[in-house]
Amino acid sequence: TAFLWTSHALQPLFGNCIDNLNYLNQTKMSATLVRLINTMPVPIFGSVRTATAFVIPKAKTLPRFAGWGLPLGVGALWFVWPAVDDGWKIEMGLKKAPVVV
């Protein structure tokens, strides 16, 4: 109880300092985590930082191509659908099972 009394007694005097130290500790930990993630290896690019630097500008151009989503999807299905196994189509309920006589 002496520690609690001391910390509560000193709270008005040093409360901001203690809060600032806690904030700095959390900031250091989050900066370390960000640094760790940025240096993780990624195939082709080398690191997450390099991959992010490449992908972010490319992602900003995607809204220009949003109108092509439906035509490309229809074209892909038109091309791929005949290659899909009939057993899978029946299993997913997209095709009726053949009648066994």
Image (spheres, grey):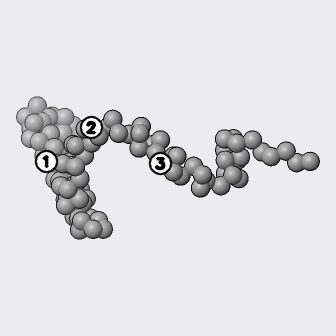
Q: Is residue 54 above or below residue 9?
A: below
- Mark linked to residue 63: 2
Q: Position of residue 89 (x, y in %)?
A: 67, 47
The reply to whether residue 77 is visible in this rendering is yes
N-terminal label among 2 and 1? 1
Residue neighbourhood size for the residue with mark 1, other residues' Cα within 10 Å, grouped as few (<14), some (14–19), many (≥20): few
Residue neighbourhood size for the residue with mark 3, other residues' Cα within 10 Å, grouped as few (<14), some (14–19), many (≥20): few
Question: Who is closer to the viewer here, 62 or 21?
Answer: 62
- Disc 3 to disc 2, how far (Cα)? 20 Å
**Cβ atoms at labels 2 and 1 below 8 Å apart:** no
**Cβ atoms at labels 3 and 2 below 8 Å apart:** no
Q: Given the current orientation, which residue lies at the most extreme top position? A: 12
- Disc 2 to disc 1, how far (Cα)? 39 Å
Residue neighbourhood size for the residue with mark 2, other residues' Cα within 10 Å, grouped as few (<14), some (14–19), many (≥20): few
Q: Is residue 69 left or right of residue 29?
A: right
The reply to whether residue 2 is visible in this rendering is no
Amino acid type, mark 2: Pro
Q: Looking at the image, is mark 2 or mark 1 nearer the viewer?
A: 2
Disc 2 on helix, strand or loop? helix
Q: Given the current orientation, which residue lies at the most extreme right position? A: 101
Q: Residue at x 33, y 35 (%)?
A: 67
Q: Position of residue 95 (x, y in %)?
A: 70, 42
- Mark linked to residue 24: 1
Residue wearing tag 3: 76
